[in-house]
Image: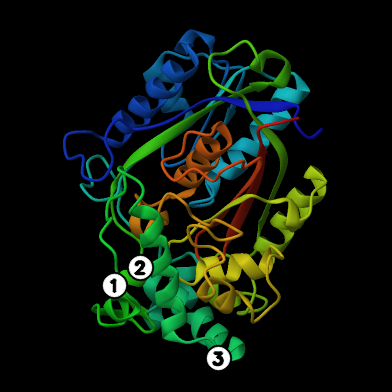
């Protein structure tokens, strides 16, 4: 993809975030879609490409009255929407469609119209992990994290610091679920979930969603909002079983996805003004900083502890408050993308002054997949 050839022209989250017991999953998708359409002054009749996860693109297109010429139902967990952005950019450049709507909606807390969490006994996880008690995200992520902490020399307090600093960002965001300040001791004294994860190291469980609308850079200047250009993208997958990671200290999918995006954008880590790293649990920003090349292995915890990612720091990270304090309805990637777009538009609640390049990096499953999108507000 030629950097800057595609732009985001519409972006919005659901009207409400947090607890929405009176809306179904497909209703949340539609609410976010209508808000994004209003953001750029389009209607559903203007859309000819649809991408989504959690719901079928068939259901979303039918519900909104769209007859697309391109559809993508890629579903690899929370970073699915990063992959949708990448695929949509390729489709528009190829002339398969002109205007793509990407939607997300999830009733993670209220469970209205949501499916279950079960995995088939015949699946790889069902056969080789679940019999040993590896059944939920906290018990899955502990497998690599325990090795990672030992190898890197990191501590529980280092994980706690991630949550503390992200709460500082959340305090600046009126839409954040939790805004009260917390300390390292608060995190370490919160209830144990699965060692080393304390409750305040784990993501929120919320309802909500979001939507993006993409088109060519040529058309983007004709819309009311400031275009946010896609400079580079990457994606990869590794394994559906966290126990089978090639290296518990690093995500292969992170490294491959990030490297591809940076190469495509033609930038280095020093060029990045704003960073979003999917934080379902407090260890993920540490892995992300190292695997994306912002820190050397073993230096990420100190980088955060020295407040480089905090308000006023040189690399603002998860400026909406992240999945730990802002929102996490299950598949968080859409919210990371939304914050990147807000920063590039210059309208984020905790706006980074003069930010021109933003990286949005996501994880799917337990290091199963990854997607990276690099945005800019100039071509």
Residue drawn at x 29%, y 64% is 181
Q: How crowded is mark 3: few (under 14 residues within 10 Å), some or many (20 or more)?
A: few
Q: Are marks 2 and 1 in contact (CB under 8 Å)?
A: yes
Quarter that holds the C terminus: top right
Please state the horizontal and vertical placement of residue 54, each as a whole percent of the image. 42, 42
Q: How crowded is mark 2: few (under 14 residues within 10 Å), some or many (20 or more)?
A: many
* Earlier sequence position, callout 3 versus callout 1: 3
* Earlier sequence position, callout 2 versus callout 3: 3
Q: Which mark is residue 202?
A: 2
Work out whether residue 232 can be spotted.
Answer: yes
Please state the horizontal and vertical placement of residue 255, each as a whole percent of the image. 71, 63
Q: Label 2 to label 3, Cα distance in Å?
A: 20 Å
Please state the horizontal and vertical placement of residue 182, each as a whole percent of the image. 29, 69
Q: Label 2 to label 1, Cα distance in Å?
A: 5 Å
Residue that carries the numbered disc 3 in the rendered image: 150
Give 152 or 126, whichever is nearer the viewer: 152
Residue drawn at x 45%, y 10% is 43
Q: Label 3 to label 1, Cα distance in Å?
A: 21 Å
Residue drawn at x 21%, y 39% is 20
- Residue 67 vertical position relative to residue 59 in the rendered view, above or below: above
Q: Is residue 223 left or right of residue 208?
A: right
Give 272 or 110, whichever is nearer the viewer: 272
Q: How crowded is mark 1: few (under 14 residues within 10 Å), some or many (20 or more)?
A: some
Quadrant in the picture for residue 250: bottom right
SS assignment at label 1: helix
Quadrant in the picture for residue 15: top left
Q: Residue 265 carries which label?
A: none
Residue that carries the numbered disc 1 in the rendered image: 199
Residue drawn at x 50%, y 80% is 145
- Residue 97 vertical position relative to residue 116 in the rendered view, above or below: above
Work out whether residue 281 can be spotted.
Answer: no
Quarter that holds the N terminus: top right
């Amino acid at each position: 993809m030629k950097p800057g050839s595609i732009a985001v022209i519409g972006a919005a989250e659901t009207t409400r975030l947090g607890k929405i017991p009176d809306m179904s999953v497909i209703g949340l998708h539609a609410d976010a879609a209508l808000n994004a359409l209003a953001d750029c002054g389009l209607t559903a009749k203007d859309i000819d490409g649809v991408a989504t996860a959690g719901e079928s693109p068939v259901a979303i297109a039918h519900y909104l009255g769209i007859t697309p010429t391109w559809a993508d139902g890629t579903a690899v967990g929370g970073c699915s929407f990063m992959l949708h952005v990448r695929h949509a950019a390729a489709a528009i450049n190829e002339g398969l469609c002109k205007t793509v709507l990407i939607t997300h909606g999830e009733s993670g807390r209220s469970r209205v119209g949501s499916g279950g969490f079960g995995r088939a006994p015949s699946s790889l996880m069902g056969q080789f992990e679940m019999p040993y008690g590896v059944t939920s995200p906290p018990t899955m992520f502990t497998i690599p994290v325990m090795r990672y902490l030992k190898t890197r020399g990191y501590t529980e307090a280092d994980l706690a610091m991630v949550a503390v600093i992200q709460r500082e960002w959340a305090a600046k965001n009126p839409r954040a679920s939790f805004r009260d300040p917390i300390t390292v001791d608060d995190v370490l004294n919160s209830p144990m979930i699965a060692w080393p994860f304390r409750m305040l190291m784990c993501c929120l469980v919320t309802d909500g969603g979001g939507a993006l609308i993409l088109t060519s850079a040529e058309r983007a200047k004709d819309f009311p909002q400031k275009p946010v250009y896609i400079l580079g993208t990457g994606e990869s997958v590794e394994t559906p079983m966290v126990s089978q990671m090639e290296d518990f200290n690093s995500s292969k999918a992170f490294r491959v996805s990030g490297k591809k995006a940076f190469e495509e954008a033609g930038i280095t880590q020093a060029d990045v003004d704003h960073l979003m790293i999917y934080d379902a649990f407090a260890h993920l920003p540490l892995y992300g900083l190292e695997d994306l090349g912002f820190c050397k292995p073993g230096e990420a915890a100190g980088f955060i502890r020295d407040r480089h990612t905090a308000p006023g720091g040189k690399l603002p990270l998860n400026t909406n408050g992240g999945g730990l304090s802002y929102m996490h309805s299950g598949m968080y990637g859409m919210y990371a993308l939304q914050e990147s777009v807000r920063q590039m538009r210059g309208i984020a609640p905790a706006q980074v002054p003069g930010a021109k390049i933003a990286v949005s990096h996501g994880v799917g499953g337990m290091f199963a997949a990854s997607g990276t999108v690099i945005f800019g507000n100039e071509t």
